[in-house]
Image (cartoon, rainbow, N blue to C red):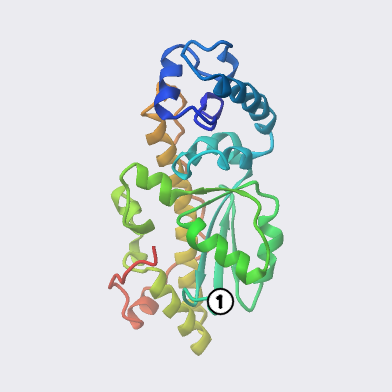
Amino acid sequence: MLCRTFCHIPGIGHKLERELWRAGVTSWERWRNPPPLPLSAVTRLEAERLLARSAEALTDDPSFFTSRLENAQSWRIFPQFRARTAYLDIETTGLGADSAITTIALYDGREVQTFVNGDNLEDFIDAVAPFQVLVTYNGKGFDIPFIERYFRITLTQAQIDLRFVLARLGFKGGLKGCERMLGLHRGALDGVDGLFAVRLWHAYRHSGDERYLHTLLAYNVEDTVNLERLMVEAYNRNLAATPFTDELLPCPQPPPLPFFAESDCIAALGGGVVSPSRY
């Protein structure tokens, strides 16, 4: 889909992009000068320049595209850079500037890595470095700036924030709301949210009972692993509205999960009542 994209060129919006497709300009290779539609001289020059640069960026520069696409259109880069994509979610002690990261889950489509405050949290910095794209839900508004502030680093990866992509498709209500709308259920973790995750962390720190930590990690991992399913769903639903439906992606299979929720720990903390989402 990325090589069929023209809306990252100034002067070419979604309507004009569709008109180009209907006129036979269905990929960068099919661009011709003059184009089959009336475009300003400035737009034609910009198109020539940016399409040449796009071809160069196609191999290893996803940020070239995400910096020029609307947030809701970032789904277009996904298949091209999927092998270099990680799904990311964090849990914290709160939302304020003095809050800390408790756990991080990182998933590359094959393996899940987890990072825990007081254990291996600093290892996250090296673990995330090789990836070129990060997929989150509300990561632009929460996870990424929180990580950058907490570790005093800058994450330079291109970002696909599914909050924007899914909202354009009509899916809202936070990550859990989007999951429910798409038929995803969490079993013992249904009703657990980010605020309850804070309680799990405090229960673990107070008691030393690792079952609370494992339940928190199970929740964090589920948030992260489910992002791949949502990413593919969002890609396919957006693609279905284009002429290129033969390029739909198969539904991914979830990996073996390294942690499982302890129902008695959730019950001990009054679990099962959904509190307001941080999103």
Q: Which residue is mark 1?
A: 100
Of all residues shown, which one is farthest toward the front? 41
Residue drawn at (36%, 28%) of the image: 241
In-front residue for pair 65/59: 65
Q: How many marks?
A: 1
The image quarter containing residue 170 is top left
Residue 38, percent across and down? 47, 14
Q: Name the amino acid type tagged 1.
A: Ala
Instruction: Please state, as top left, top right, bottom left or bottom right, where the C terminus lies in the image.
Output: bottom left
Q: Residues within 10 Å of mark 1 (few under 14, many from 20)?
A: some
Residue 226, percent across and down? 44, 52
Residue 142, percent across and down? 49, 63
Residue drawn at (32%, 75%) of the image: 271
- Element type at marker 1? loop
Residue 118's place in the image compared with 161, above or below, is below
Residue drawn at (65%, 46%) of the image: 132
In-front residue for pair 202/275: 275
In-front residue for pair 14/142: 14
Residue drawn at (65%, 31%) of the image: 58
Residue 128, percent across and down? 66, 56
In-front residue for pair 110/27: 27
Q: Is residue 185 left or right of residue 125?
A: left
Residue 35's place in the image compared with 190, above or below, is above
Residue 206's place in the image compared with 23, above or below, is below
Q: Is residue 196 left or right of residue 214?
A: left
Of all residues shown, which one is farthest toward the bottom? 206
Residue 157's place in the image compared with 232, above or below, is below
